[in-house]
Amino acid sequence: MTEKVFCMVMRIHIDCNGCYRKVRRSLLSMKELEKHLIEKNQSMVTVFGRFIPQQVASKIRKQTNRRVEILDIQEFGRTYENQDPKP
């Protein structure tokens, strides 16, 4: 099974530069994420890529020891493995 492409918005409490670095390091270590955006002032993190949203949220929570709240998940494109391409 191939993962679908998702864009997920999370709220992670980021109150200092150390917390920001910890969250950023956690995001950079995940190979399944293609892009990420950390909005420090709003404590919002947006990630984009081929992943399973609940698994990414739990990985971030374990690595940063921060509470992760999923606000929005958008799914882009579906993968159909058993369909023949149309000519």
Image (cartoon, rainbow, N blue to C red):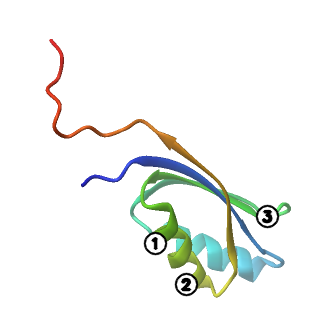
Position of residue 40 in the picture relative to residue 37 (left or right): right
Residue sitting at the far top:
87
Per the image, label 3 sits on a secondary structure element best described as loop
Residue neighbourhood size for the residue with mark 2, other residues' Cα within 10 Å, grouped as few (<14), some (14–19), many (≥20): few
Q: Which residue is mark 2?
A: 63
Q: Which residue is mark 1?
A: 29
Q: For the residue marked with disc 3, what is the amino acid? A: Lys
Residue neighbourhood size for the residue with mark 3, other residues' Cα within 10 Å, grouped as few (<14), some (14–19), many (≥20): some
Position of residue 8 in the picture relative to residue 75 (left or right): right
Name the residue at 68% across, 83% down: 66
Q: Which mark is residue 40?
A: 3
Q: For the residue marked with disc 1, what is the amino acid? A: Ser
Numbered-mark total: 3
Asked if the residue under mark 1 is in contact with the one under mark 2, i.e. CB atoms within 8 Å, the reply is: yes
Position of residue 24 in the picture relative to residue 44 (left or right): left
Q: For the residue marked with disc 2, what is the amino acid? A: Gln
Per the image, label 1 sits on a secondary structure element best described as loop
Residue 62 in the image: x percent, y percent? 55, 85
Q: Is residue 85 above or below residue 70?
A: above
Mark before the other along the chain sequence, 2 or 1: 1
Mark before the other along the chain sequence, 1 or 3: 1
Mark in front: 2 vs 1: 2
Q: Is residue 81 above or below residue 28?
A: above
State the CA–CA distance, disc 3 to disc 2.
18 Å
Q: Is residue 8 above or below residue 66?
A: above
